[in-house]
Amino acid sequence: MTDPLHSPHHRAAIPLAPSLDPSLADAHMPTRLPVVDRRVVRLCAIAIVLGLGVGCIARALTVLIGLVTNLVFYGRLDTAFTSPAGHHLGAWVILVPAAGGIVVGAMARWGARAIRGHGIPEAMEQVLTNESRIPARMTWLKPLSSAIAIGTGGPFGAEGPIIATGGAVGSLLGQYMPVSADERKTLLAAGAAAGMAAVFSAPVSAVLLSIELLLFERRARSLLPVALAAAAGTGMRFVLEGAGPVFPMPTLSPVAPTALVVYAALGLLMGVAGVVVTRLTYGIEDAFEKLPIHWMWWPALGGLAVGAVGYVAPRTLGVGYDNITAVISGQLSLAAMAWLAVSKLASWSIALGSGTSGGTLAPLFTIGGAIGGVAGMWLAQAAWLHVDPRMAALIGMAALFAGASRALMTSAVFVFETTLQPHALLPLLAACTTAYLVSGLMMRHTIMTEKIARRGVHVPTDFVADRPL
C-alpha cells in the first residue's frame, strides 16, 4: 500500500522549499519577473530628473504667488512670499479676491475646466479612468490660475496646485515616451510627490500620499521611482530655499500616558470635524450648482465672500503658513484661535465650493490646528492630564486631515516632517487612527473622492497582495 505522504499527487500539491530541493521547488513555482529590471532603473533615472524639474517649478510657483500678492495688496514689484494680512486697502479688499475669481473663471471656461478645485481629485480621476493622461495645457494653466487665486487673497495652500502640476508634468513625460500605462501612472505619482516634497520639505509623507491617493498600490516597480522623485524634489528645495522645518516651533516634551489617552480622544473629535468639513464643502458646491448663472462666475461670487471675511479677519487671506506656525507655537490666544478656525473655515469652504483653484492641505491644517489648540488650552486647565496646547494643535492639524481625506499615514508623518518634533509621532499616530475610525463610520467617501465618486468613478479603498498563481 502506498504511503499517502510520499504519493506523487501529494508531492505535487505541496511544493518543497528551495532549501530542501531547489530543482523540485522550481518545477512547481510560477515564473515571475524580477523585482527590479532595466525598465525600472530607467524609470528611476527619469523620476530623478522629473523631481529636480518639479522642485524648480514649485519654487517658481511660490515666487509667482509672492509677485501677485505684493502687486495686488501692496502695489510693489516683489517676489517675497508674504501674507496679505498687513494690507492697507480698507474695504476695497473685498473686491480683490472677486477680481481674481473672474480671471480664474475665464481661464477655466476657455482654457481647461479641470483647473477648478484643489487638484488631487482631478489627478485621481485621470489615473482611474484615462490611463493617467493629463492634457499638456494643465502644466501651465493650473499653476498660473492658482497663483492668481491665491495671490489675490484666496484662502488656499500652494501644495495642491503644485501636486497637480507635478502630476501633469509626469503624465506629459509618460505620453511622449515609450512607457506603459502603469509606468505613466508611476511618473504622474512621482511628479506629484516631488511637488509636495518641494513645497513642504516632506519627502516621506509625499511618497505616502502618492501611495494612498494616486498609485493605489505598493510595489517596488512604482515605489522606487516615486521615492527618488520625492528625494530629488526635497533636495532642490534645500538648494533653492534652505533646509529646516517648514513650521518651526519650540521643542516638545515626551507625552505622559494620561495625555496620550486625551490626544487619542481628541482624534475622535477631529474625525467628526473632518466629516463636517467635507459635507459642508460639498453642500456649498451643491448650492452653487443651483445658481441660475454660468459656472464661470461662481469663483467671483466666492471671491466676494472671501473678501468680506478677509475684511473682518485679515489672517484668513492668502496661504496662511504663518498662521500654522503661530498656532502650533502657542503665539495666539484662545479667542484668536477660535476666531481663526471659524473664519478660515467659512472663507475656504465657500471659495472651494465655488470652483476656484487652490489647495486643501494648508487650510485644513490651519483649521484643525486652531481647533486642536483651543481644545488643548481648555484641557490644560486640568493639570493632572499633562496636556500641552501646542501638542494638541499638532494633533488637530493631522487628525482633521486624516478624518477628511483618510490618508492615515500621510497625515501623521507629514506633521512630524514639517515640524521635526519626534515626541509627537506617537500621539499623532493614535489621533490620526481614531479620526480615521470615526470618519470611516460616518462617511463613505472623503473630501478627495466625493467629487469623482459622484461622476461614477470607483475609487479603491483597500490594497491587498496579489494571490499566488
Image (spheres, rainbow, N blue to C red):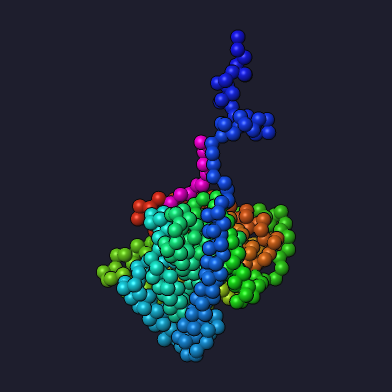
Residue at left offset 31%, top offset 70%: 295
Outermost residue on the left side: it is: 292
Q: What residue range appears in magenta?
A: 459-469
- The N terminus: image quadrant: top right
Q: Mostly what secondary structure, the magenta segment?
A: loop
Q: Answer yes or no: is residue 120 visible.
A: no
Horizontal relation, residue 342 to residue 409: left or right: left
Inspect this view and state whether residue 203 appears.
yes
Q: Nearer the viewer, residue 111 or 297?
A: 111
Q: 431 or 169: which is nearer to us?
A: 169
Q: Relative to 449, is 323 above or below?
A: below
Furthest residue toward top: 1
The answer to which image quadrant residue 309 occupies is bottom left
Relative to 369, 350 lies left or right:
left
Please name the residue shown 57% across and 46% down the image: 34
Measuring 60% from the left and 58% from the top, which residue is drawn there? 412
**461 drawn magenta:** yes
Q: Residue at x 49, y 60 (%)?
A: 187
Residue 348, magenta (yes or no): no
